[in-house]
Image: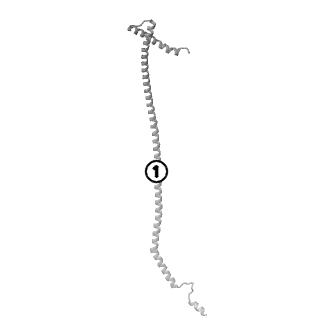
Amino acid sequence: MHSLILAAEEPLPVLPVTSEIIVGAVAFALLLGVLWKFAVPRFEAMYTQRTDAIEGGLTRAREAQEAADQLKKQYEDQMADLRAQAARIRDDARAEGQQIKAELRAQAEEEAARIRLRGEEQLAAQRDQVSRQLRGEISGLSVQLAERIIGNALSDDARRSDTIDTFLSELDGLEPRRDAAPAGGPS
């Protein structure tokens, strides 16, 4: 029995002592009050600060992305403008090249016409000079021929010039017939 009496006096090990429950509850309430008063607002402030930082970072990232997209669009627009301007410059250069080519061709044709005209003038002058030389030679030869045929020398200058003029006029009369004969003659 002794053991039964001892057991009734000792508290059960599973149940805490009532004073400990009260002290534990008061200490827990104080700890909860201190945490609620000091720690929770700091945690809330940190949470709000982190949320703002994250959302602000995302907002800044979106804004930076929008700014980058806008810069990219401006760059692409500028590149398109530059490509169009380069195409215009190439077209202008081609047109200017064609114009210069046409001008050079016109200048070359004018120069060729001038050279041709100068050549024709020189040819006409040379033809006249050769004609005069031939007339002089022919007149000398005709006098010699006439002296041989007639048998006596033509000493008189007036007579000699009449004979030369007559011979030359006959030669001038023969030239058109020679030019007309091959054109209209038998083939």
- Label 1: element kind: helix
In depth, the one of 78 and 47 nearer the eye is 78
Q: How is this picture coloured? A: one colour
- Residue designated by label 1: 75
Left or right: where 157 falls relative to 65: left
Residue 123: where, in percent of width, then height? 44, 22
Q: Residue furthest top?
A: 151
Residue located 45% across and 76% down the image: 34
> Farthest residue in the bottom direction?
2
Q: Residue at the spot x=46%, y=41% of the render?
A: 90
- Residue at 49% in and 83% down: 23
7 or 94: nearer the viewer: 94
User: Where does residue 175 sit, x and y in percent of width and height?
Assistant: 47, 14
From the viewer's side, name the closer residue of 116 and 8. 116
Q: Quadrant of the N terminus?
A: bottom right
**Residue 122 placement: quadrant:** top left
Residue 156 rendering spot, x and y as whole percentages:
38, 7
